Amino acid sequence: RKEKKDNMKPKHPEEQEIPFRLRELMRSREAMKCPGPGKRRAAEEKQQQKSQGPKAPGAVPVPRFRRGKGESERSYVCRMQQEVQRVLFLAENQLQREPEKEATAPEKSKRKKEFQKKKLEKARKKKEEKKEALLEKSLFQDKVPFGEVVTQPPTITSRPRGRAPAQQAGRKQLLLRARLGPSQASPASLASPVPPVVSMARRRILEEERARVIRAYRDIQRRKQLERERAQ
C-alpha cells in the first residue's frame, strides 16, 4: 500500500519544494518577459492595427512586406511587385470619398424622439393640472380668523361677470310694445296694480289699436314664412 505524499515532512528540512501555484506564476511571468516568435508576431500585428485605428469603408489596406523563411530574394521581389500593382489598381478604381458629408454621429431614432416628446408633454400637462387644482382650491377657501362665529350663510352682493341685470316683469322690449303708442306702452301703466277707469270711446280706440297691431304682427309673420319658403 502506497502512502500519501500530502502533508508529509520534507526529506531535507533545509530544502523545501516550491509550491505548484507559485511555479505557474513564475512561468507566466517569464513568458510575458520573453514571448515566443509566434506570440511576438501576433502582438506586433495587434499593435499595428491599434495604431492604424478603425479602417474607413472602402479604404485600400496598405500591405507590409516581410521576407518569409526560406524564400528567395527573387520570389520576394516578385511578390512585392504584385502587391504594389494590386494596391495601385484598387486605389485608382475606388470610389471618391467625401468624409465631410458623412454623418459624424448616429442620431436618435424617430420613434425614440416621439416617445420623449410625449413623455415631456404628459409631465407638463400633469403639472399644469395640479397647479390649476391648487389655485381653484385656494380661491374657494376662506380664511376664518380665530374666534369668529357664523350665524347665517353669506349673501351674494355681486352678479356674475359678463351678465346684465335681470329685467323685471312687464319691462321687456317686446314686438307688440313697439307697435303700441308711447302712452299705451308705458311701463308705469302696465305695472300699476289698479287699472285706471277708461271711458267707452277710449276703450274702443284701444280695441281698434289692438286689432291693428295684431294684424300687423300676423302680416310680419306671414311675410317671414314666405321668405323662408322661397329661400328653400
Image (cartoon, rainbow, N blue to C red):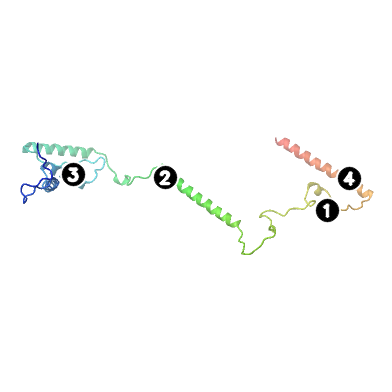
> Pointer 1: residues within 10 angstroms few (<14), some, or many (20+)?
few
User: Mark 3 = which residue?
Assistant: 46
The one of 217 and 26 positioned closer to us in this rendering: 26
Quarter of image, res 86: top left
Whole-percent x and y of residue 41? 13, 43
> Pointer 3: residues within 10 angstroms few (<14), some, or many (20+)?
few
Which disc, if any, is residue 113?
2
Quarter of image, res 154: bottom right
> Pointer 4: residues within 10 angstroms few (<14), some, or many (20+)?
few
The residue located at (18%, 44%) in the rendering is: 46
Q: Which amino acid type is marked by label 1?
A: Ala
> How far apart, in angstroms, are the residues tagged by discs 4 and 2?
81 Å
> How far apart, in angstroms, are the residues tagged by discs 3 and 4?
120 Å
User: Mark 4 = which residue?
Assistant: 208
Secondary structure category for the residue under label 1: helix
Q: Earlier in the sequence, mark 1 or mark 2?
A: 2
Q: Which amino acid type is marked by label 2?
A: Lys
Q: Which amino acid type is marked by label 3?
A: Lys
The one of 54 and 133 positioned closer to us in this rendering: 133
User: Mark 1 = which residue?
Assistant: 191
Whole-percent x and y of residue 147? 63, 64
The residue located at (60%, 57%) in the rendering is: 139
The residue located at (50%, 52%) in the rendering is: 127
> Pointer 2: residues within 10 angstroms few (<14), some, or many (20+)?
few
The one of 158 and 4 positioned closer to us in this rendering: 4
